[in-house]
Image: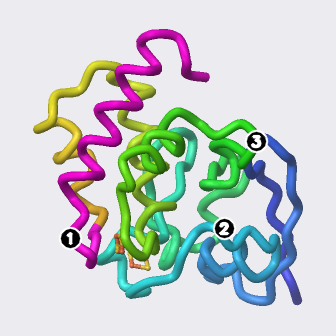
Amino acid sequence: MPSQFDFTVNGRPVSVSVDNDDTPLLHVLRSILKLVGTRFGCGLEQCGCCMVLIDGEPVKSCAKPVWTVASKSVMTVEGLGTPDKPHPLQQAFLDEQAGQCGYCHSGILVSAKALLDRNPSPSRREIAQALDDNLCRCGSHNRILRAVEKAAAQMREGAGR
Ligand code: FES
Ligand code: FES
């Protein structure tokens, strides 16, 4: 018999029915809720491209059973900004051309958001530590670090949300 779980995604209440309580959150986000910004990479909690925020904390969603987010608040990259009104992090990633394929970006953007929410003035070392669980196979690390620094500066100047 299917189980039903209620939680919020990007501020919107959702109610999801699954046959298996251990269905990964990533599957629910992508295949049931059609939020395909969050990516499937390794499926083994190794690469970080499936990262979302759960109650504000970065969590890999590929092996996270959906039952564990019942009554919680999930944020995906779709909750960050829109093409018309990008989040400063998204704008900085564009300005700095921070990626090549971009496959890692949704996970990195939400991890960076969690960092800037708790530390508006991170050092480069603190940014690197916060993104330690997010792999970029294209080797764009330096540009990604620069983009996060740029977004942090802009948010301190009042461009943030
Ligand atoms: S897909 Fe989840 S960590 Fe790689
Ligand atoms: S830009 Fe390609 S994996 Fe990061």
Q: Residue at x 26, y 52 (%)?
A: 143
Q: Residue at x 45, y 58 (%)?
A: 59
Frontmost residue, 7 versus 100: 100
Horizontal side of residue 93 vs 137, given as left or right: right
Query: Alpha carbon of mark 2 to alpha carbon of mark 3: how far?
Result: 34 Å
The crowd level at tag 2 (other Cα within 10 Å; few <14, some 14-19, many 20+) is: some
**What kind of element bears circle 2?**
helix
Residue type, mark 1 in image: Gly
Q: In the rendered structure, which segment of residues is drawn in magenta?
A: 135-161
| Magenta part, dominant SS | helix
Q: In terms of secondary structure, where does tag 3 sit?
A: loop
Residue at mark 1: C-beta within 8 A of ligand 2: yes
Count of numbered badges drawn on the protein: 3
- Image quarter for ligand 1 equals bottom left
Task: Name the mark nearer the viewer: 2 or 3.
Answer: 3
Q: Which residue is mark 3?
A: 84
Q: Which numbered tag is attached to residue 58?
A: none
* Residue to which mark 2 is pinned: 67
Task: Identify the residue at image location x=28%, y=70%.
Answer: 136
Q: Quadrant of residue 2?
A: bottom right
Which image quarter holds the C terminus? Answer: top right
First along the sequence among labels 1 and 2:
2
Residue sitting at 69 percent across and 73 percent down? 36
Amino acid type shown at disc 2: Trp
46 relative position to 4: left or right: left
Indicate yes or no whether the magenta region holds residue 67: no
Q: Which residue is the site of mark 1?
A: 139
